Image: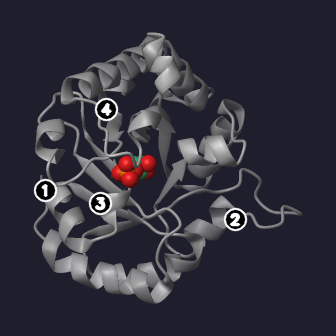
Amino acid sequence: MRKPIIAGNWKMNKTPAEAKELIEALKPLVADAQAEVVVCPTFVCLSAAKEAIAGSNIHLGAQNLHFEPKGAYTGEVSAEMLTSIGVEYVIIGHSERRQYFAETDETVNKKVKAALAAGLKPIICVGESLEQREKGITKEIVSLQSKLALEGLTKEQVAGVVIAYEPIWAIGTGKTATSDEANETIGDIRAAVREVYGEAADEMRIQYGGSMNPKNASELMAKSEIDGGLIGGASLKAEDFSQVVKY
Ligand SMILES: O=C[C@H](O)COP(=O)(O)O
């Protein structure tokens, strides 16, 4: 039985003071949640967020990392820097990073390995563009992205990672994949991972992301393959995010 995981990707929003305020508001609202709850603020908010989640059931994630342990990489943050301040999860290969910051399947794989080596749990994002969906190649795209992201990992490592399936055309647009479409594609991802890693694919959790909100969360979460959500816009308000968490 896979434990559902609902993560809030705050993207480039909130100051440390606002992060603290949001978490303080969220804590009582999600205290009895059945799902694992994760918040992923910007790097500058991580320490304030760590302090604010103390004693609660909220876990902390970052939105990115560099794959090298240290060195001349201006503006970057290593896995060890994240673990040193108590970060547990890290989002890797979000489509915005692939689109605006030239991340590739190769760098995603390097980041996944660096995260695991440091003891971080990766949340790996995959998803097709509208053009790819219209061409009917969604299954091929997400299967390849997933296999390349996980290349070189052990079965045990694969069992512990989280994949977030985010159709790019559904991110921040208010458009969402139907629950059947999301379930089918997540099933395709799991089948592709099973080809290489066997039963580890059935332990690995796969989230849906893309305009998931209090209105559609319960329908999406009722689907057999969907193990959680990666939430953008709706994670910025405590009330909305808590409703998704408690779908
Ligand atoms: O990481 C989260 C996703 O990009 C979804 O964002 P959204 O909920 O604003 O569509």
Mark 1 or 4, which is nearer the eye? 1
Q: Which of pointers 3 and 1 lies earlier in the amino acid sequence?
A: 1
Where is mark 4, residue-wise?
A: 203
Can residue 231 be seen in the rendering of this structure?
no
Where is mark 2, residue-wise?
A: 77
103 left or right of 199? right
| Label 4 SS | helix
Q: Quadrant of residue 193?
A: top left
Q: Residue 140, position in %: x, y?
A: 50, 13
Query: Mark 4: which amino acid?
Result: Glu
| Label 1 SS | loop
Marks 4 and 1: in contact by CB < 8 Å? Answer: no
Ligand 1 within 8 Å of disc 2? The answer is: no
Mark 3 or 1, which is nearer the eye? 3
Q: CA distance from mark 2 to mark 3?
A: 26 Å
Mark 2 or 4, which is nearer the eye? 2
| 90 versus 167 height, above or below | below
Sort mark 4 into few (<14), some (14-19) or many (20+) by Cα contacts within 10 Å: some
Query: Mark 1: which amino acid?
Result: Gln
Query: Mark 2: which amino acid?
Result: Val
Q: Which of pointers 1 and 4 lies earlier in the amino acid sequence?
A: 1
Task: State the residue lying farthest toward the right.
Answer: 72
Q: CA distance from mark 2 to mark 4?
A: 29 Å
Ligand 1 within 8 Å of disc 3? The answer is: yes
Where is mark 3, residue-wise?
A: 234
Residue sitting at x 14%, y 61%: 243
